[in-house]
Image: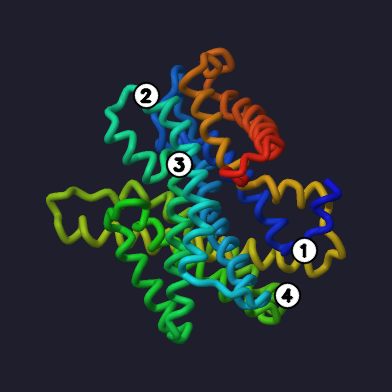
């Protein structure tokens, strides 16, 4: 692990990235109980497990996106690297789209083998399964770079970004709709990276941290409690049009509060710490690879093995977590050792 100590890293990112990927793995181990995946053989509903999944998802993807924007902003604003639209697009095609396609084909071979070619091709191109995140993140880099170069003031940029969240409720191909929601968090990361002094002041503000956490928890719990009441019939056009917007901005509000709370808390911890343990830096360095592998492993366990029946519906998510984390790390290390030029994880 010594090689990770010699590289210049953003410590707040190194602390948060392993936390975020752990929560994503937890999320997908419990997603079935949240009603987002098909039930496995022997499935039994569990309210506690539903809340574990919902809580894990409540700010995690937004945090991932903010960290990506923060790193990109650090390169732009602090390191003063020169980028062009072509260089950004080329780099992110290799870093995001190529892994998405490679793992998308693997995902399709395991789970889509009985579907027609055009359906499979579209799903792979759009990011099969969890790989939607890579497609979405690619567009965030492109759109954020164009916004950064636009010359507009930050005030108008954020007004546009808040408005884009409304458009994200419309289905747009190739995950552009998701990018329009997450773009706010990506650009916020860019802004935070260029305002280190403001971050240092904000992270020491105990009242602010308390308010952010309380707002996050209150809005999140209220949303989950009210969600059954937010389902409306298509017969009511006005409600059917307005309710998705209400839900999207409600999610945005608690995700923003949670993301800022954990970011500033991490920033504060690292301000008071002289060094980062090498194992934390190692975990941060393999987070992307773990993300690529983890959901495939989880779905194989749930839908391609008899393990759920053998261990029962209440133990299976924990067993799944214990298998998925170390196996994902092992597979990442094997791929890194193979040094595949076309697949950088």
Give residue 8's mark.
1
Residue drawn at point x = 67 percent, y = 40 percent: 339
Residue 207 or residue 39, whichever sits in front: 39
- Compare marks 1 and 2 and give the one earlier in the sequence: 1
Marked residue nearer the N-terminal end (1 or 4): 1
* Residue bearing mark 4: 204
Q: Residue at x 51, y 24 (%)?
A: 300
Residue under label 3, please give it. 101
Please tell me which residue is depicted at 48% across the width and 54% down the height of the picture.
Answer: 93
Q: Say whether marks 1 and 4 touch (CB < 8 Å).
A: no
Number of other residues with Cα within 10 Å of mark 1, as a class: few under 14, some 14 to 19, many 20 or more: few
Place residue 297 in its image quadrant: top right
Nearest to N terminus: mark 2 or mark 4: 2
Q: Is residue 299 left or right of residue 201?
A: left
Q: Residue 113 got which mark?
A: 2
Q: Do the residues bearing badges 1 and 3 touch, measured as CB atoms within 8 Å?
A: no
Q: Could you say where residue 272 lies in the image, as x and y percent from the top left?
A: 83, 68
Task: Give the Cα distance between marks 2 and 4.
Answer: 53 Å
Labels 3 and 2: the sequence-earlier one? 3
> Is 8 left, or right, of 41 in this rendering?
right
Position above or below: 327 against 8? above
Residue 223, position in %: x, y? Answer: 42, 54
* Above or below, 234 relative to 53: below
Label 3: element kind: helix
| 125, 57: nearer the viewer | 125
Q: Nearer the viewer, mark 3 or mark 4?
A: 3
């Amino acid at each position: 692990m010594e090689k990770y100590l010699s590289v210049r890293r953003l410590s707040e990112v190194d602390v948060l990235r392993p936390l975020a990927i752990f929560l994503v793995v937890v999320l997908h181990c419990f997603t079935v109980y949240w009603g987002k995946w098909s039930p496995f053989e022997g499935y039994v509903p569990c309210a506690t497990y539903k809340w574990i999944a919902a809580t894990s998802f409540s700010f995690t993807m937004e945090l991932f996106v903010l960290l990506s924007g923060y790193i990109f902003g650090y390169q732009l604003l602090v390191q003063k690297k020169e980028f062009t639209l072509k260089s950004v697009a080329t780099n992110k095609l290799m870093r995001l789209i190529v892994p998405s396609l490679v793992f998308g084909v693997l995902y399709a071979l395991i789970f889509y083998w009985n579907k027609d070619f055009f359906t499979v091709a579209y799903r792979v191109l759009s990011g099969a399964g969890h790989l939607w995140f890579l497609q979405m993140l690619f567009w965030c880099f492109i759109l954020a770079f164009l916004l950064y170069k636009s010359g507009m003031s930050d005030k108008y940029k954020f007004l546009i970004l808040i408005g884009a969240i409304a458009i994200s409720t419309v289905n747009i191909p190739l995950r552009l709709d998701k990018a329009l929601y997450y773009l706010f968090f990506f650009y916020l990361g860019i802004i935070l990276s260029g305002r280190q002094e403001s971050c240092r002041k904000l992270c020491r503000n105990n009242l602010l941290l308390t308010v952010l956490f309380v707002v996050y928890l209150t809005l999140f719990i209220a949303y989950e409690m009210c969600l059954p009441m937010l389902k409306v019939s298509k017969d009511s056009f006005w409600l059917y049009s307005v309710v998705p917007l209400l839900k999207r901005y409600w999610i945005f509000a608690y995700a923003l509060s949670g993301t800022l709370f954990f970011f500033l808390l991490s920033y504060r911890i690292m301000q008071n710490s002289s060094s980062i343990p090498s194992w934390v830096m190692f975990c941060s360095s393999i987070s992307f690879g773990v993300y690529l592998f983890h959901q495939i492993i989880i779905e194989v366990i749930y839908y391609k093995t008899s393990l759920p029946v053998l261990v029962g519906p209440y133990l299976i998510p924990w067993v799944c977590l214990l298998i998925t984390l170390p196996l994902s790390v092992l597979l990442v290390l094997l791929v890194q050792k193979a040094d595949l030029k076309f697949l950088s994880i």
